[in-house]
Image: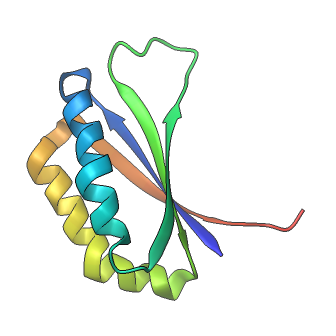
Amino acid sequence: MMILNITFHIDDEIHANALDYLKTVYIPDATKSGKVTDARLCKIWSNGDEADGHSYALQFSIADIDALEEWNAQTGRMLNMRLVERFSDKMVGFATLLQEMDL
């Protein structure tokens, strides 16, 4: 099992709208195919001044890299394009793929 972690930074100006969009549109559309599951949205806290915006980590479980590539081709790129069209440079993000390890 792997974790797809997408970190977003959202400007104050669009914060409420962008957060609502993630919860009501982005996450349901991302999980619709069943390739990514178990969505978790986490606020990222920092010791610095949050006056310039808010950061979040959105995580999904995914079976393997093949499933991720298929999801990205069918869904992920389209979702990213919609974010750019809707929020421009007021919401930016990057993805990290994590592999769970046995303790």
Q: In which quarter of the image is residue 74?
A: bottom left
Residue 80, picture quadrant: bottom left
* Quadrant position of the N terminus in the picture: bottom right
Q: Residue at x 24, y 29 (%)?
A: 16
Q: Residue furthest left?
A: 85
Residue positioned 11% across, 47% down in the render:
86
Q: Which colour scheme is used?
A: rainbow
| 88 sits left or right of 1 in the view | left
Q: How far across and how far down the image is residue 101, in percent? A: 79, 67
Q: In this view, does 76 lie to the left or right of 87?
A: right
Q: Is residue 24 above or below residue 15?
A: below
Position in image of residue 78 (x %, y %): 20, 69
Left or right: 36 in relation to 15? right
Compared with 60, 49 (above or below) is above
Residue 6 x/y as whole percent: 44, 53
The residue shown at (47%, 85%) is 67
Q: How many marks?
A: 0
Vertical comparison of 21 with 1: above or below: above
Residue at 35% x, 12% y is: 51
Which residue ends up furthest to the right in the rendered image? 103
In the image, 4 versus 25, the foreground residue is 25
Locate residue 31 relative to residue 99 in the image: left or right.
Answer: left
Residue 49 point in image, percent of width and height: 45, 11
Identify the image quadrant of the C terminus: bottom right
